[in-house]
Image: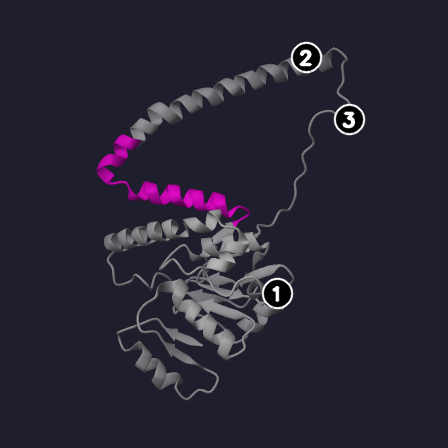
């Protein structure tokens, strides 16, 4: 299933010439560019209703993968897994970091907001802001941490002196820590991922309100609300060229456009944070 998301550069005609007579390939052209989520939702809806698909693999147009990838992803499917991402590399065969890798999507979203707001500050104000934060936030915080450290050292020294006088701690006194091999619940590669049949037991599509950027964060919230997980499978390499959606912009303009899209997506995604699973399913 190939969705042409309202292109006007002759892409659809090229696809028709190349795949028009291939029986197992379906082409669908949208009237206008609906963005990442709605564009993929059109393909997901068609694949599930017209082609009877149980699982749907979503990928960018700038990825290359082996024919065995789908079998490898499906082999990793299990109860409670809603999204399976492949092993992705850049064009130099360096491992590509995960778009989302967290046990707490809310915390990740909060840090993303802080980063975007920080990057959106005009450079002329940035230096003054940093000076202000240092004087009224970081400097007092450092003094407070230093005071707590001195208090902790004092208490520890007193406790040590007590043990030297013959008073011993019992084996069960104090807190015992253990190192656990924890795995993040939400691991997603934004350029390529499989929505499993478990996912479609809860949702019928991706969150449709965003246009570009932030879809992986929305997907992690979807998973959390439904009690599902996102995992990465050890698959044959998927090569991602990267940033093809904004390659027509120069460096400065590209960063500005990406920030604008990200701010818009984060704003449009806010309802997800406060809605229950049942309300999300009802509305979207």
Disc 3 crowd rating (10 Å Cα; few below 14, some 14-19, many 20+) is: few
Q: Residue at x 70, y 25 (%)?
A: 174
Residue 179: quarter of image: top right
* 175 vs 265: above or below: above
Location of residue 193 in the rendering, given as x and y in whole percent from the top left corner? 50, 64
Percent coordinates x, y for residue 209 in the rendering: 39, 58
- For the question of whether residue 99 can be seen, the reply is no
Q: Residue furthest top?
A: 165
Question: Where's the N terminus, which quadrant?
Answer: bottom left
Separation of disc 1 and disc 2 at Cα?
56 Å
Residue situated in front as seen by the camera: 136 or 274 = 274
Camera-side residue: 237 or 19? Answer: 19
How many numbered circles are shown? 3
Q: Name the colour scheme.
A: one colour
Report the residue marked by disc 3. Answer: 171
Please tell me whether mark 2 sits on a helix, a strand or a loop: helix
- Residue 130 x/y as whole percent: 31, 31
Give the CA distance from mark 3 to mark 2: 18 Å
Q: Which mark lies nearer to you, 3 or 2?
A: 3
Q: Is residue 30 left or right of residue 151?
A: left
- Badge 1 or badge 2: first in the primary sequence: 1
Q: Residues within 10 Å of mark 2 (few under 14, many from 20)?
A: few
Extent of the magenta region: 102-129
**Which secondary structure, mark 1?**
loop
Q: In screen coordinates, is 139 left or right of 236?
A: left
- Write down the quadrant of residue 201 in the picture: bottom right
According to the picture, the residue beneath numbered tag 2 turns out to be: 161
The residue singled out by tag 1 in the image is 76
Residue 161 visible in the shown view: yes
Name the residue: 38% across, 23% down.
Answer: 139
Reply yes or no: does residue 106 show up in magenta.
yes
Q: Residue at x 27, y 36 (%)?
A: 126
């Amino acid at each position: 299933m190939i969705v042409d998301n309202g292109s006007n550069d002759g892409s659809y005609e090229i696809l028709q010439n190349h795949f028009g007579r291939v029986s197992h390939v379906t082409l669908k052209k949208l009237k206008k560019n609906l963005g990442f989520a709605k564009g993929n939702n059109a393909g997901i809806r068609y694949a599930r209703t017209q082609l009877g698909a149980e699982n749907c693999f979503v990928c960018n147009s700038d990825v290359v993968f082996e024919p065995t990838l789908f079998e490898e992803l499906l082999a990793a499917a299990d109860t409670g897994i809603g999204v399976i991402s492949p092993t992705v590399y850049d064009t130099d065969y360096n491992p590509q970091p995960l778009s989302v890798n967290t046990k707490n999507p809310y915390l990740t979203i909060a840090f993303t907001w802080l980063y975007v707001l920080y990057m959106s500050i005009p450079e002329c104000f940035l230096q003054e802001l940093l000076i202000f934060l240092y004087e009224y936030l970081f400097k007092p915080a450092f003094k407070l941490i230093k005071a707590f450290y001195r208090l902790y050292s004092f208490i520890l020294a007193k406790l040590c002196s007590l043990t030297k006088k013959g008073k011993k701690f019992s084996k069960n006194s104090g807190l015992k820590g253990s190192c656990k091999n924890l795995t993040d619940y939400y691991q997603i590669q934004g350029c390529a991922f499989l929505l499993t049949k478990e996912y479609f037991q809860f949702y019928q599509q991706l969150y449709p309100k965003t246009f570009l950027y932030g879809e992986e964060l929305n997907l992690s919230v979807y998973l959390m609300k439904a009690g599902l997980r996102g995992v990465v499978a050890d698959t044959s390499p998927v090569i991602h060229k990267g940033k093809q959606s904004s390659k027509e912009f120069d460096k400065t303009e590209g960063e500005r456009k990406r920030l604008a899209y990200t701010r818009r997506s984060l704003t449009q995604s806010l309802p997800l944070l406060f809605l229950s699973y049942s309300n999300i399913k009802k509305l979207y």
